[in-house]
Amino acid sequence: MISRSDVAAARARIGSRVRTTPVFDDGERWFKLEQLQHTGSFKARGAFNRILAAAEQDGLPDAGVVAASGGNAGLAVAYAARELGVPAEVHVPETAPAVKVAGLKALGASVVQVGREYAEAYESAIKRVADTGALFCHAYDQPEICAGQGTLALELEEQTGGVDTVLVAVGGGGLMAGIAAALEGRSRVVAVEPYGCPALHDALAAGEPVDVGVSGVAADSLGARRAGDIAFGVARRTGVRSVLVADEDIVTARRELWRRYHLVLEHGTAAAYAALLTGAYRPEPGERLALICCGANTDPSGLTQRRTLVTAE
């Protein structure tokens, strides 16, 4: 379990290695532009905190670090490892977007593609850690990872003067856990998940993390088969609730974020905005609401439709 003090310690440890990402207010809500973070998502925060904390405590193994990821967590670990001079190996599903695989290789990581889902890449990575003694960087279920992700909530609080509600897309729940721990007693947190990837939603309904099916347009970033134990514990402790949105609404939200604000975001990020567009979450009048724009590792070609210009002869 993690608390606000763990998040504050992570912020001090990470220091200037991550960007303080901006916010803007459209008159109805705040947007925290975390897609402008190193490697295009919030994940760099947790990756730096995990590696630096391990170095402080026991030192880093010669084998370096190993991660399993649908893409974003691997990119963050690869970046942090490169910046800290540590070897990195990232296991990803064969379905990982090509843009993310190319990014991993460009950052100098060794890439292993295995299976169709994150769970299969995870098992491959765990075996590799057992064989080599490398430091494992979990995509979402380690205290240092969650606390690192939560540092964006401390920034958000300072930048806005505090909000009533934070709306955030959830896969395994590491970001949600960090935010909810950082803002416990200060702001409520609402998790948004696709119907095809309802790991936290089903865990809260069952009273414990359970396996779920994984499918849909946001599966590459939100497709955890099971919510993390830390995420579940923090969600239960702080009263986080989950709302669900459909794939077609995620696609629409992603295009609307581009049309209205010129924000290029991945489908997983757009899930949070879809909750507002569909009424899955309805803010109260005067509610101070923040939406976390958590990732932008995406192919932007689907954001606009091509138009054919017809000229008169």
Image (cartoon, rainbow, N blue to C red):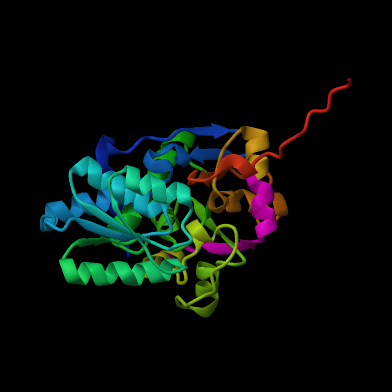
Q: Specify the farthest residue to the right.
A: 313
Rendered image quadrant of residue 147: bottom left
Residue 108: x %, y % from top left = 27, 45
Total marks in image:
0
Is residue 27 in view? Answer: no
Residue 64: x %, y % from top left = 18, 55
Q: In the picture provided, is 292 more to the left or to the right than 174?
A: right
Specify whether residue 170 is painted magenta.
Answer: no
Residue 28: x %, y % from top left = 65, 38
Residue at screen point 55% across, 63% down: 241
Is residue 205 in view? Answer: yes
Q: Which residues are magenta?
A: 237-254
- Quarter holding the C terminus is top right
Residue at screen point 52% across, 75% down: 212
Residue 99: x %, y % from top left = 46, 47
Rendered image quadrant of residue 37: top left
Specify whether residue 247 is painted magenta.
Answer: yes
